[in-house]
Amino acid sequence: RSRWSCPRVVRSAAADGQAVAVGPVQTTEAEVKTPAAAGRRSAAVVQTAGGTKESGVKEAPLDLNPPRGTRDFFPDDMRLRNWLFDKWRRASELYGFEEFDAPVLESEDLYIRKAGEEVVGQLYCFADKGGRRVALRPELTPSLARMVLAKRGQLNMPIKWFAIPQCWRYERMTRGRRREHYQWNCDIWGVGEVTAEMELLSCIVRFFESVGIGSDDVGIKVNNRELLREVLHKNGVPDDRFAAVCVLIDKLEKVPLDHLRDDFRALGVEGSQLDSIAASVRADQTVDDVAQLVGEDSQAVKHLRDVFDMADAYGIADWLVFDPSVVRGLAYYTGVVFEGFDRAGELRAICGGGRYDTLLEMFGGEPIPAVGFGFGDAVVVELLKTKGLLPDFADTSVADAVVWPLAGGDETSTVQQAAGRVATRLRQSGLKTDVILENKKSKWVFKHAARVNAGVLVVIGADEVAGNEVTAKRLCDKEQQRVTLDGTHLEDLAAEWAMG
């Protein structure tokens, strides 16, 4: 008999260190019982008639780090993550977007159908136990397209949806680029006018402003994929090579042209033809420059002019820059594309998006005009850190009040029950309340209350239980009062003191 495991992921020098799925891998029962046979150092436990026994192989120490390219989120990290997500949600809601989500695990075919070759090569993909090919989502747009197609005819267009999904790509890590990240997505479906692009661009700018980033820090490069298609047509590049040439043009900002000539030559683009294309997509070109090449009657030129004209009305003109080399790496973009960039040049693309009117056709549906963007968490945190704009969570209040049952011996149970009743009352009144769960000395209790930034300490001992009262201590100045448990005296005082 045989068993099937997940595909093995190996490193290949030819793939520049990227992961390659080579499976599923068939293993025998003996291999399952004896991991050492597969070169793994572990203490294999094998089944015997008398129970289990150690194989004698030493167990390797457990690696306490998360998998390479991923992160743990300790409470301080979660405070930052929640703060960022709240900013994203607030910006989305200001522009009338509704939140949605989709499974992190999708059919592998969903991504292979439409993504660029680079994304397909970065998939975390495997065969599940039913033999189905699945993948961890590298982005959310295909899932959104699947959902829209599934509800075709039932959705009231236009739709404006946003999400903050966790995404996975096995890619080379750099500053601000990880193998898992959270990504803010906003998408508008059912609008073919550039008014949709303007809403998205304005939403991005409002977020930047809400965290203290200005147009001197960040800009947004804007281009049109159709304009690039027209430029390539003028230079003799056929449609069937457009996507492949776009991938190479996308690299020109990071890789010198001479290093890419062989790749262009393999696509039939070389010599003066290549030099002409490279000159047309230089960052110093203006819309007027490119319009002279393709003609003023170009719809792509018109759409770009509309974007820059409307930018004044939205108050974001200082943020936008025309850059004919911007194509974005995904094959499904069809019109205006844009990319946020660090003006200091220290970080990779901060965010990006564009129009993808024909995406549903790749899944067998009728086209619906659509445009959206993605905005990763890792790179924007790096930007905020560089600018000294990360919030200080040192004064974050974990608890408004701390309840301390102070008793021992036979009275312990009675006092603990009373503490539970008091804590419940405070929580029901809306106060974040922590309870000291073990018998602790006063020094420890006060130190703990300071660590959680509580405003009030509520002490309950045997005397307080007998008198139906508690002792409340205001921690900022150590003022204390005996407070009856009748009525809402305790809740009112605790709320006042917790507010400082």
Image: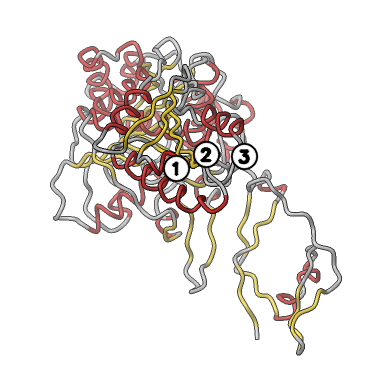
Q: Say which of 35 and 484 sits in front.
A: 484
376 shown above or below 102: above
Which residue is identified by label 2?
268
Residue at image point 70% right, 75% down: 32
Q: In the rendered structure, which amino acid carries the disc numbered 1?
A: Arg
Q: Secondary structure at mark 1?
A: helix
Q: How is the image coloured?
A: secondary structure
Q: Position of residue 347 (x, y in %)?
A: 54, 23
Which residue is identified by label 1?
241
Q: Position of residue 2 (x, y in %)?
A: 65, 82
Q: Are marks 1 and 2 in contact (CB under 8 Å)?
A: yes
The quadrant the C terminus occupies is top left
Which residue is identified by label 3?
172
User: Residue 259's image quarter?
Assistant: top right
Question: Badge 2: few (under 14), some or many (20 or more) residues near its Cα, within 10 Å?
Answer: some
133 shown above or below 147: below
